[in-house]
Every structure is written in structure tokens, then in C-alpha cells.
Image (cartoon, rainbow, N blue to C red):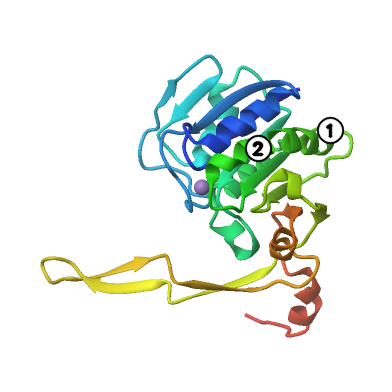
Amino acid sequence: MFILCTNDDGYLAGGLQVLARAARTLGEVRVVAPDREQSATSHSLTMHFPLRSRRVGDDTHQVDGTPTDCVALALGALLERRPDFVLSGVNHGPNMGEDVLYSGTVAAAMEATILGVPAVAISYTGREPERIAEYEPVLAHLLQQLLNPERFPAETLFSINLPPVSPSELRGVQVTRLARRVYFDSITRAHDPSGREYFWIGGGGVEWTAPEGTDYRAVQDGYVSVTPLHLDLTNHALLADVRAWELRL
Ligand code: MN
């Protein structure tokens, strides 16, 4: 098995090293990852600047672009052959609910899916990224089961969230749907030293709607959450209703 690993926290991030070690138990690994933190860059593609890649070590390239750039460059130019799977993570932070739409980690897996390579995104929901290393054996075992070319679903990626507990306290694995979350007070308005107003997005609070069967609930309850995601955003259930509006030109 030939596996590409990437992430959005940069090629030096501890979570990526853990992921690459887990992946090496399953096959041959290449790492192509951003040269710096690219969290919350979503599915951004760099088109107005050149991109440069630098080899750092035998099986690793760093790229001065986004996670999506890394996957596009790896598959289109840097790798000697097409990978069987793309793994993205382990992100230093959660990617649940609507956050999958902002996540660079999940976007890298989405890009692989668009390019026809099955992919898995992995995120750690705890606050201490140095503890991700404890998850290496759990991750290797889980990936061994997921990376099965015979049953890996088409046009689908998996998003895994690891709960904020040590692996010895894990209660199991749950296959989940996305929860819903609302941020509040997340825009700060202030003034810079010259007196000009500025805004800063981030911080504030977050409220979850997370019934049984959702990703957020699963990790709260001490389970590893595995969510199958597909890229078709069409609201299929609504098609007939909206067609009945008989929109005309
Ligand atoms: Mn990140």
C-alpha cells in the first residue's frame, strides 16, 4: 500500500509524525505538508502565486501552500506514483459539526476524494497535542480496518475525531453524523495603537446541538467518532418541492 500523509498544522507538527508512524505499519509512506500552520484555510487553492516545494528528509516534502495545494501538488507532480490512500492529520484540535467546512485537515481529504483517491481525515479533540502519540497503536488498528480498497465507499471520505481522553479510557468506536454548533461573541471589535478600528475573528463561545449519534456527543462520551462525509451538498430531499415552484424565466 502506498500512502500520502498531509495535514494543516505544518510538516513539523507532532500529530503528523504520529500519523506517518501509524501509516508506516500499513505500507510505504510519503509526506507532503505545508511549511507552516494552515489551519482553517478550508479548501483554499493558491492560484495567484507560484508554489515551491522543498525536500526535507527521505520521504517528506514541505510546500509553501495550503493543505489542498499539497494534495494537488503531490498527486500531480511530486509523487512518483499515485497513492492508494491519502491521510490528513492528526489535527491538533477537533473537526466536528460545521467546522468540517472551515477545516484545512478535512479539505485535504476532500481534495483527494475529488481527485479520485480515497482519504481519511483525523483530528484530536483534546487540548494537549503532545498526547496524540498515545493514540498511535489505536490509530494504526483503526486505519488498517478503514483502508480496505474493496469496501472503501466511492466519493466519500471519513473524518475521525479522537476523544480528549487517554486511550486506556476509550469506550469504543461510534459511526456518527455531524452535530450542529453555533459560535457566539466570536468577533472582537477594538482599536489599534493609531486609533483605527479593527476586527478579530476567533475566541468567543460555542454551543453544540449534539444528540445521540453525532460526532460531538460520541467524543464527549469517550468514543472515537468516525463520520462518513460526501461532497454532494445538494439538498436532495428538497428537489421535488423546489421544482414544484415552477420557476420561470
Ligand atoms: Mn490544524
First in residue order: circle 2 vs circle 1: 2
Residue placed most toward the observer, 102 or 82: 102
In the figure, is residue 151 to the left or right of 135?
right
Q: Quadrant of residue 26?
A: top right
How crowded pointer 1 is (Cα within 10 Å; few <14, some 14-19, many 20+) is rated as few
Is residue 156 at least partly visible in the picture?
Answer: no
Residue projecting furthest to the top = 58
Q: Quadrant of residue 176?
A: bottom right
Disc 2 target residue: 134
Is residue 84 at least partly visible in the picture?
Answer: yes
Residue projecting furthest to the front = 168
Q: Type of residue at label 2?
A: Glu
Residue projecting furthest to the bottom = 245
User: Comparing marks 2 and 1, which lies closer to the viewer?
Assistant: 2
Q: Type of residue at label 1?
A: Pro
Q: Residue at x 67, y 34 (%)?
A: 86
Vertical placement of 82 versus 89: above or below? Answer: above
Q: Quadrant of the N terminus?
A: top right
Vertical placement of 213 versus 63: above or below? Answer: below
In the figure, is residue 68 to the left or right of 124?
left
Position in image of residue 193 (x %, y %): 13, 65
Q: Is mark 2 within 8 Å of ligand 1?
A: no
Q: CA distance from mark 2 to mark 1?
A: 27 Å
How crowded pointer 2 is (Cα within 10 Å; few <14, some 14-19, many 20+) is rated as few
In the figure, is residue 155 to the left or right of 207?
right
Q: Residue at x 52, y 22 (%)?
A: 60
Disc 1 target residue: 149
Position in image of residue 234 (x %, y %): 71, 65
